[in-house]
Amino acid sequence: MTCEYSPLSSVNGTIPCKVVGATEDHSIRFHQVHLEDMGRVRTRKVCEIDDEVVQQEDIGKGYELTKDETVPITDAELDQMPLPTAKAIEIVAFVDADTIDPVRIGDSYYLAIDGQVAAKPYTLLRKALERSDKVAIAKFAWHNRERLGLLRVRDNAIVLHAMRWPDEIRDPAELAPKKTELDEDEIEQAVQLADSMTIDDISGFRDAYRDALEELIEAKTEGKEPAQPTEGKAQQPSQVVDLMAALSASVQRAKESRGETDDHATVHEMKPRKKTAAKKTTKKKAPAKKAAAKKTDSKKAAGRKPRTA
């Protein structure tokens, strides 16, 4: 994707650049079809006044003031708005990277130089970001609105992350669960679970849903029956889960998947309370049995004396 909005404003001048998509969407998409004859079902844009289908070139923008009054706005009028960021990405500040809340970061784009003349200032900005260990906060116009952005370096390229404005982030306080009592052992086992599942590289993960969807499409294309799902593995959402047992089992599975067989390192041994209680009970009962045994022996011995006499 090439953006007509150049240049990139830097502290000491401008850098002519192009905006290139940094991500790709590999999702499998479907068409809506009429099941009776598999004909495509298309969405048509119809004017609500004359009930006629409207072509794209006849469609414009309008802002509704009231139910009966709409103000038309043209693309030319939007392009002529007196915004410093209308045709540029303007750097407004530098901040430490760890001060940015990840929830504010949206789509990502690479900034590529637009001509060799931009090579030196582009490299200068990249080096400044690398050595300062900071990210740049920028403002730019995109899809008829001014947006906030974040500039950082990735593999010798400058990346532009679209960001949400502070007032666009919802307060999660109302979503937090009510105060819940947790045992220290539960927290410790959760930490051990995180430790046992820690890896250095996540590049091996695949989209399992997309793989299964491709297999389904291939089977349908070849006239085969789709593979049936494995039964009995799905857990019912309403099932009450023993948290400690679930954590222990999760840690064990994580270690087994990594080839670790040291049973002493798993958290399922962190359940000594029940075992200790059982041992204590056994120890308490043992003397009673011995005492009972002694009494029985005494009675037997006492019973034998008259016979001997």
Image (tube, rainbow, N blue to C red):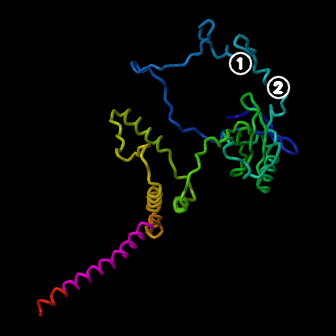
Which amino acid type is shown beneath numbered disc 2?
Met
CA gap between label 1 and label 2 equals 15 Å
Taking the magenta stretch, the answer to whether it contains residue 294 is yes
Q: Relative to 98, say whether 222 is above or below.
A: above
Residue identifier under label 2: 81
On the image, the x and y values in percent for residue 214 come to: 44, 38
Q: Which region is colored magenta?
A: 273-300
Residue under the point 55% across and 59% down: 187
Badge 2 marks a residue whose secondary structure is loop
Number of marks: 2
In reply to whether residue 33 is colored magenta, the answer given is no
Location of residue 172 (image quadrant): top right
- Give the residue pinned by disc 1: 61
Q: Percent from the top left, x then y, of residue 87?
A: 80, 32
Q: Are marks 1 and 2 in contact (CB under 8 Å)?
A: no
Q: Residues within 10 Å of mark 2 (few under 14, many from 20)?
A: few
Q: Residue 287 sits in which quadrant?
A: bottom left
Residue 131 placement: quadrant: bottom right
Farthest top residue in view: 50
Mark 1 surroundings within 10 Å by alpha-carbon count, few (fewer than 14), some (14 through 19), many (20 or more): few
Q: Position of residue 288 (x, y in %)?
A: 32, 77
The image position of residue 295, as x and y in percent, is 26, 82
> Which residue is drawn at the image coordinates 55% and 56% (left, top)?
182
What numbered label is drawn on residue 46?
A: none
Q: Is residue 49 above or below residue 175?
A: above
Mark 1, secondary structure of its residue: strand
Closer to the N terminus: mark 1 or mark 2?
A: 1
- Amino acid found under the numbered disc labelled 1: Lys
